[in-house]
Every structure is written in C-alpha cells, then in structure tokens.
Image (spheres, rainbow, N blue to C red):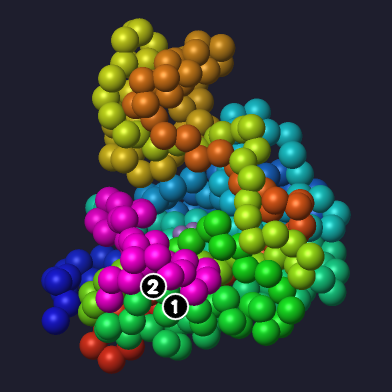
Amino acid sequence: MSELTEDEIALYREAGIIAHKVMRKAKKLVSKGRKLKYICDTLEQEIMRQGGKPAFPVNISINQIAAHYTSPIDDDLLVPERAIVKIDLGAHIDGYISDHARTFLVGGTKTYQQLRRVAELALEKAIEVIKPGIRPSDIGEVIENTITKEGLTPITDLTGHVIKRWKLHAGISIPNFKAKMDFFAPKLKEGDILAIEPFVTTANGSREVKDQNYTYIFSQNGSKAKSEDAKKLLEKINSFKGLPFAIRWLEGLLPETRLFEALKELISYKTLTRYPILLSKNNTPVAQAEHTIMITATGCEILTTG
Ligand code: MN
Ligand code: MN
C-alpha cells in the first residue's frame, strides 16, 4: 500500500503536469542567440502562471556544464551557435515536487544527437524495470548497461533521488551505475516518488564531475545570521522553505555589494549550502534526461508527462 493519500498523489500529478507543460515552452525558447536569463525567468514565470512555484531555479546547463547553472543577476550569456542544452526544471504545489529535464540541441552535431538519444533511452529502460521491491542499484545497473552498450559513458558522480514533501533530495539516491554500497541497497516501495536522471557523456569522457568556482544556487540549512543585511536576506530565504533558490531571486533586496557580503556571511555560518556549477571532468559534452515517477502496485507512473 502507498503511504500517500489520494490528495497527495493528485498534487504530485499536478506538479508533474506543470513541469511537462513548461518544458514544452522550453523547447520553443532554447535557440541560438537567446539570453539565458530570459529563458530562466520566462520558464519560472510560466511555472507560476500554471499554478505552481519553482521547486528549484531553472537550470540551463550547456555543453560540458553538466548541472547547476542558472543565470546570476547580471547574466549576459547567450545560447551559443552549437550547443547541447540541458533544461532542468521543477514545480511544487505546497511542497509536492516535480523534477524534469530534457536536452535540446542547437545546431546539433552527430555526437550531440547520440548523447541525447542515449540519455533518453537509458531513462526509458530504467522506467521499464521500476516496481515495488526494486533497489536503487538495480535501476543504476540498467542505466549503466544501456549507456555503455552504446559506447558512451554514464556520469556516475551525479544521481537521481527520492523525493518527499518539501525535500527534493530526501536521502536515498538513485545511482547511474550498479552501485554496490549498502547505501543503494534498500528496497523501494509503492508510493515512493523518484527522480530518475541519467547523465551521458562521450566515450572518451570521465564518469566524474568537477566543481566550477561559481555558485548561483543555494539552499537554507540553518538560521544563524548576525548582520542586519544577512537577517534581511534570510527573511526572504525562509520563504523557500529549504528548497533550492537562485541568487537571482534575491535581486533588489540589497545593493549588489552588500548582497554578496551578506551571502558570504550566511555561507560562513553554514546557514546556506552551496550548489556549485558542475562540469564534466574532461570538459566533454553532456546530455541529461529526467522524469519524476511514482511507484505503483505493479510498476510505476511517469508524473512529468502529458
Ligand atoms: Mn532535475
Ligand atoms: Mn533531480
């Protein structure tokens, strides 16, 4: 039996449909020369227009950037002429979260096309085997085998995750490889909500990622603040209820230099957790595909679909 009530399931479904609809907008928006900030802002507004709130900032991670890029306040970057663009977005309704990613190609090469196709295939194959009693490592094994059979490399530093109310990453990870650690061993059950998200890079690419020195996404992890500026920021940050947020969402609260000083203070007290931009280790291009699913009595239901 599912631990979720019918009302809760309805809210997860609604959040999933919003993510799906907004992703269709993303497909139209991602094109050569478009401002990244315009794409992030527009998609986040669209989530709200559809009756949700962003569960986290819209991520737009291009080429060798695997994850966690969202536009900073003054972002002049444009979609380049040749690009493999991962859009990763999610909605929540009262803490019931969806998480959905697709890869779009701009002036796509054969390599980019293959990366995208295999990311989608690995997601599809993983979804086919999900049912009560399956273990995260079993799902990871399917993802890894699908990707390596195509001669490509899974990025195993990045994982899917169990979702709970107000918790985007609720403890259990869904690996992108056959992980032998006990951590990945607990059996999943009916009513579990999972985000499955294979990341694929080229044959000569690495399974690892590296941090870039920039962070535009944070989440709240405590409440210590000393300066008046930091307290002011924290008041706003409290409204995100622990879900990830973008620096961009704090624009206008304080003049920019003071905003960054206050952020530094909150990071030093560990009041904020950083999510630095992640790159493939050898700067090889990356594709991603992600759905949020709910485990049912006999299999699973894809929530982030039409
Ligand atoms: Mn995601
Ligand atoms: Mn995710």
Compare residues 67 and 93 and report the one nearer the observer.
Answer: 67
Contact, mark 2 vs mark 1 (Cβ under 8 Å)? yes
Residue at 36% over, 54% down: 169
Residue 174 in magenta stretch: yes
Residue 172 in magenta stretch: yes
Does residue 213 appear to the left or right of 54 in the view shown?
Answer: right
- Asked if 56 appears above or below 147 in the picture, the reply is above
Residue 139: image tag: 1
Residue 136: image tag: 2
Compare residues 92 and 199 and report the one nearer the observer.
Answer: 199
Find the magenta span and give its range: 162-187
User: At which x and y percent is residue 20?
Assistant: 48, 69
Compare residues 47 and 241 and report the one nearer the observer.
Answer: 241
Give the quarter of the figure containing the N terminus.
bottom left
Instruction: Tell me the chief SS of the magenta region.
Output: loop
Residue at 31% over, 16% down: 225
User: At which x and y percent is residue 142?
Assistant: 51, 82
Q: Callout 1, which amino acid?
A: Ile
